[in-house]
Amino acid sequence: MLLGKGGCVVREPEYKYAIEIFWSEEDDCFVACVPDLENCAAWGTNYEEALAQAHVAIRADIESRRVFGEPIPEPTPRYLPKQAIS
C-alpha cells in the first residue's frame, strides 16, 4: 500500500509492465502502449490521463486473458543503463 495525494491509501498494481507514452501528432493526443501485452494501448489528452488509462487497459487485458484461459505474459525485465560520471 502507498499513500497517494491527500494521504489517501492507494494499492500498488500487482503487475509490473513497462508503459511507453508518447505524443501522437496524427491522433493529437498522448498514446500509452504496453509492449509486453500485444495490442494493449490507451490514450489521453495529457500524459497523466494516458498513464491512468493504460493502467485500466492493463487490468482489462489481464482479466480477459484469465477469463479465456490465455497465458499472462511475464513483464520483460528492464534495467537502467550504467552511466559513468566523470
Image: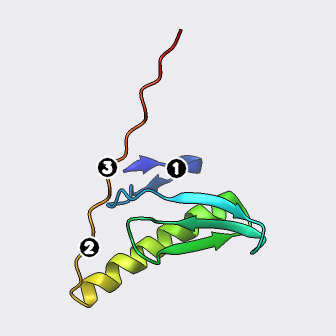
Residue at image position (37%, 46%) is: 78
Residue at image position (22%, 77%) is: 71
| SS state under label 2 | loop
| SS state under label 3 | loop
Disc 1 or disc 2, which is closer to the eye?
2
| Kind of residue indicated by mark 1 | Gly
The span from disc 1 to disc 2 (Cα, nearest Å) is 28 Å
Q: Which residue is mark 3?
A: 77
Rendered position, 64 above or below 41: below
Disc 2 or disc 3, which is closer to the eye?
3
As drawn, is 43 to the left or to the right of 7?
right
The span from disc 3 to disc 1 (Cα, nearest Å) is 26 Å
Mark 1: few/some/many CA within 10 Å (<14, 14-19, 20+): few
Residue at image position (58%, 49%) is: 5
Disc nearer the start of the sequence (3/1): 1
Q: Which residue is mark 1?
A: 4
Q: Which residue is mark 2?
A: 72
| Kind of residue indicated by mark 3 | Pro
